Image (cartoon, rainbow, N blue to C red):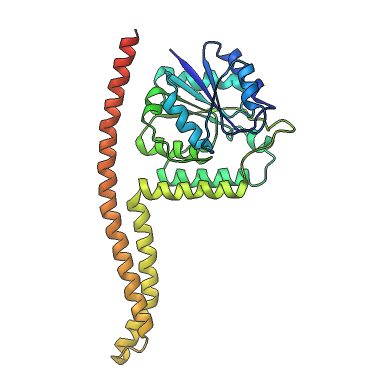
């Protein structure tokens, strides 16, 4: 069974050699792919010198790199890890085992449960951001995933061949988690240790701008995956605002049989109409999404049968 280690990289010359050596020690038969995303340092050269299969991805952003990797790399199991040496390689066996036994389609390296991320991470607000994203997604899907945004994951072939990569940047991990929950893939979390970047190595994440991108991704995927809940929420808000604006008009009419608050009346009618349109959109889009899920399931069966035939042929 072929295993591929996927390492998206951008300016990681200080750490990439150690990451490659560590994975070679843990998985001597695996192919290690380093995709250089327009690095301005010696990441590309160092990765090649240390025996990795190195390619360049000119489209900037981690999501674009993962998309290229999933398209181009053929394996039975995939391990995705950052090139900054923050994830200990010895946990890779625990990540791969549930895939091999069929317990999971995607395994997640959980940095948060044992407290090492909170202890090691020195970047302000990252813990707050992780907790916010985790809470939002777990409430939406009634799940209990501990680490939504970890960069240390493993996948089986079925997941990789059926995952549509939409995000272009660091939101890709959030997209993977939401997609897995929405489409019913088997997920298993493996508690891992986390260590902060070595001195001289800098994070490419911007706490606020990338945090806003992640929140925007959740908002967009919420709209796309759960339109009934999304548009009903806005319908209720608009209806409440319409009632707030309209109740004084109705009260005045009952007392005087006249309406002097014409602007309020127009505003109230407009808000109620928007609420009705929002709810109608919820009903229509929920039907569309329901049919889309059924279509996805049928296509997933097709992918599964193709993978079975490939596996039998390779034997």
Residue 19 drawn above or below residue 260: above
Q: Residue at x 61, y 13 (%)?
A: 25
Quadrant hosting residue 115: top right
Which of these two is toward me, 254 or 263? 263
- Relative image position of residue 72 (x, y in whole percent): 44, 25
For the question of whether residue 146 can be seen, the reply is: no
* Residue 164 appearing in the image: yes
Observer-nearest residue: 65 or 273?
65
In the rendered image, the vertical position of residue 45 relative to residue 290, given as above or below: above
Left or right: 57 with respect to 165? Answer: right
Count of numbered badges drawn on the protein: 0
In-front residue for pair 207/51: 51
Locate residue 157, reporting x and y percent: 40, 23
At a point 52% along the width and 48% down the height, the residue shown is 213
Give the image location of residue 122, x and y in percent.
70, 40
Residue at 27% of width from left, 44% of height from top? Answer: 290
Q: Quadrant of the C terminus?
A: top left
Task: Answer with left or right where residue 219 lies relative to residue 60.
Answer: left
Q: Quadrant of the N terminus?
A: top left
């Amino acid at each position: 069974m072929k295993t591929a280690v996927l390492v998206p990289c951008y300016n990681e010359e200080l750490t990439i050699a150690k990451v490659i050596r560590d994975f070679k020690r843990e998985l001597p038969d695996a192919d290690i792919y380093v995709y250089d995303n327009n690095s301005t340092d010696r990441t590309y050269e160092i990765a090649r010198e240390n025996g990795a299969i190195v390619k360049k991805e000119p489209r900037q952003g981690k999501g674009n790199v993962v998309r290229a990797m999933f398209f181009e790399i053929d394996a039975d199991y995939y391990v995705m890890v950052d090139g900054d040496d923050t994830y200990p390689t010895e946990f890779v066996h625990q990540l791969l085992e549930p895939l091999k036994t069929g317990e999971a389609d995607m395994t997640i390296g959980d940095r948060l449960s044992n407290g090492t991320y909170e202890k090691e991470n020195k970047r302000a607000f990252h813990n707050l951001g992780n907790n916010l994203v985790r809470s939002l997604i777990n409430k939406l899907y009634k799940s209990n995933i501990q680490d939504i945004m970890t960069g240390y994951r493993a996948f089986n072939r079925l997941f990789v061949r059926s995952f549509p990569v939409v995000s272009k940047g660091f939101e890709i991990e959030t997209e993977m988690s939401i997609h897995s929950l929405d489409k019913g893939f088997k997920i298993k979390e493996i508690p891992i240790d986390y260590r902060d970047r070595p001195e001289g190595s800098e994070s490419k994440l911007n706490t606020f701008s990338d945090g806003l991108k992640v929140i925007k991704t959740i908002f967009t995927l919420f709209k796309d995956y759960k339109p009934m809940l999304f548009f009903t929420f806005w319908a209720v808000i608009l209806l409440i605002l319409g009632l707030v604006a309209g109740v004084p008009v109705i009260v005045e009419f009952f007392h005087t049989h006249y309406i002097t608050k014409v602007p309020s009346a127009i505003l109230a009618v407009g808000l109620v109409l928007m609420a009705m349109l929002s709810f109608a959109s919820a009903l229509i889009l929920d039907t569309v999404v329901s049919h889309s899920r059924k279509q996805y399931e049928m296509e997933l069966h097709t992918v599964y049968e193709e993978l079975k035939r490939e596996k039998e042929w390779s034997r």
